[in-house]
Image (cartoon, grey):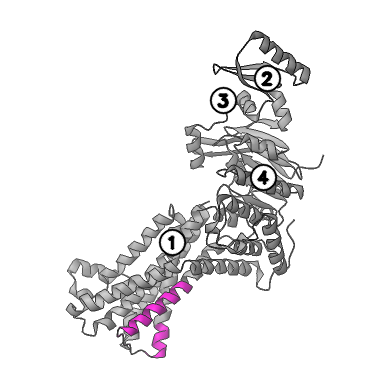
Amino acid sequence: MTTITTPPALGWGAHDTAALIWRSVRRSVRQLDTILLAVMLPVMLLLLFVYVFGGALDTGMDYVDFVVPGIILLTAGYGSANTAVDVATDMTGGIIDRFRSLPIRPTGVLTGHVVASMVRNAVSTALVIGIAFVIGFSPSASALDWVAALGLIALFVLALTWIAVAIGVVASGPEAASGFTFIILFIPYVSSAFVPPDSMPSVLQNIATYNPITPLADTVRGLLLGQPVGDTWQAAVLWCVGIFLVGRVAAGLLFRRSR
Amino acid sequence: MTAPVVVARGLRKSYGDLTVLDGVDLDVAPGGVLALLGPNGAGKTTTVRILATLLKPDAGTAHVAGKDVVTQAADVRASISLTGQFAAVDELLTGVENMRLMARLAHLGSREVRTRSDELLELFDLTDAGRRVVKTYSGGMRRRLDLAVGLLGRPQVVFLDEPTTGLDPRSRNALWDVIRDVVAEGTTVLLTTQYLEEADQLADRIAVIDHGRMIADGTATQLKRAVGSAHVQLVLRDGETERIATDGTVPDVRRILADVERRGVAVDTWEVRSPTLDDVFLTLTGRPAEPTEELVLATQES
């Protein structure tokens, strides 16, 4: 018989979610290579852009200052997308059946992965920003600007992670899910992340204008370089909230349907 | 007779045109071990998944520990554990971490999380391996850990879905020992298997399932008796096999062998054989207990 224990102060829901967050964070610690890749890939692109292409690009400012906000978003995007692989691993192995046959709310498993993604991304974003400083990134942001910029990046990570979770739930396996990370890697190219869109042909310019990465990159860049942000931040936040809602609802529905 | 802990009546399940369960009835008495025996695609896994609340039947009812598996699924989950065909453990955590995580999720008290985990690791001979990441475990160790995880919450009923499929004979024997320990503690067990020997070794009752229907139910001895008595089997030097019925007594076997000698038949090997569950399956279904390709595909779809 199951031992009857008194529920903890915050209830079983919080207790279960805490245990599942612990699990996902542990898994991340055991896969340091994933975090390492999530740092190395953007850093290599950063070096490539700054030292190889940067000299040929006229952005009206030091190219390193222009491109670092874009690289930070790339880091966050790639790191979030990796969650799809973890979720797909759970869904296609036997462990999801075990969670489902426990007296817990099984969606806590997904919450665990999302929180672990936030933690992983905090680490990799911090490392990428640190390396950016080493190669000459010189932001002129106030403490408040930093908080706003990092807050927006965190919101972006949260939103994109939930999309990754939804994709992980429906993916046929971890390999298929990892394809998602590659798609995410290419989205920032046709946006204002690495080059000003007005240097692009008009078709791509239109795509870049409506690419959610554009308002995000513009806002983060404006905040970190101490420039006026205007109302692009509203577009950035709205995009993130929209992506979050779609991802969250889709993940929940697909997860319930997937048994 | 005590009321059964697991009861199913008229379970039906189909996927499109494919009928997987076609009216399954079963009972498991408290503390009993029922083996659900059948080839791939017979409906064993589907039955277990319904009983473990992972799947809803199209028709029929099932109760586990007195609770309805559809309308009282949460209550059922509190009194069962399921060990499936795939080891449901986290590859990236250590054995100990897996145990502690699942103990917490089974809502054990904080001290019991520790004591019960250690106790089960010891029982399943995993104490030393407990500090290692599960990715480094052998198949047999993984299944043992999987089973140990399932027992953390002291479930009243344990479902084992093909617990030894894919294991080497030594690991299989080790797992059988562990399952016997579980049974000795009074836990009710429902296991599925396609190995006739496994059903014979572990179960006190065997239900034979084929094409989603129960085709026989009884003790191993009853099932064997149903297909006839023992026989002397001769493998002749020319490769032919000859079977002569016997009651298995010494004088009778001696008489048969004397008779064979008198006939001057060149015998390579001989043995007295009781009917095996293979014979049972052959008699009941008219075909051996080998999965056909079509049936394998059907299981994968379900």
Start-end of magenta stretch: A119-148
Quadrant location, the N terminus of chain B: top right
Residue pointed to by mark 1: A84
Secondary structure at badge 1 equals helix
Q: Chain letter for mark 1, please.
A: A
The disc labelled 1 sits on which kind of residue?
Ala
* Image spot of residue A6 (x, y percent): 73, 68
Q: Nearer the viewer, mark 2 or mark 1?
A: 2
* Image spot of residue B226 (x, y percent): 70, 24
Which secondary structure dominates the residues rendered in magenta? helix
Q: Nearer the viewer, mark 4 or mark 2?
A: 2
Residue pointed to by mark 4: B176
Residue pointed to by mark 3: B287
Q: Are marks 2 and 3 in contact (CB under 8 Å)?
A: no
Circles 4 and 2 on the same chain: yes
The span from disc 4 to disc 1 (Cα, nearest Å) is 37 Å
Q: Quadrant of residue A197?
A: bottom left
Q: Nearer the viewer, mark 3 or mark 1?
A: 3
Q: Nearer the viewer, mark 2 or mark 3?
A: 2
* Label 4 environment density (alpha carbons within 10 Å; few <14, some 14–19, many ≥20): some
Q: Residue at x 70, y 64 (%)?
A: B108
Q: Nearer the viewer, mark 4 or mark 1?
A: 4
Secondary structure at badge 4 equals helix
The disc labelled 4 sits on which kind of residue?
Trp
Nearer to us in this view, B54 or A68: A68
Q: Are marks 4 and 1 in contact (CB under 8 Å)?
A: no
Residue pointed to by mark 2: B232
Secondary structure at badge 2 equals strand
User: Of all residues shown, which one is farthest toward the right?
Assistant: B1
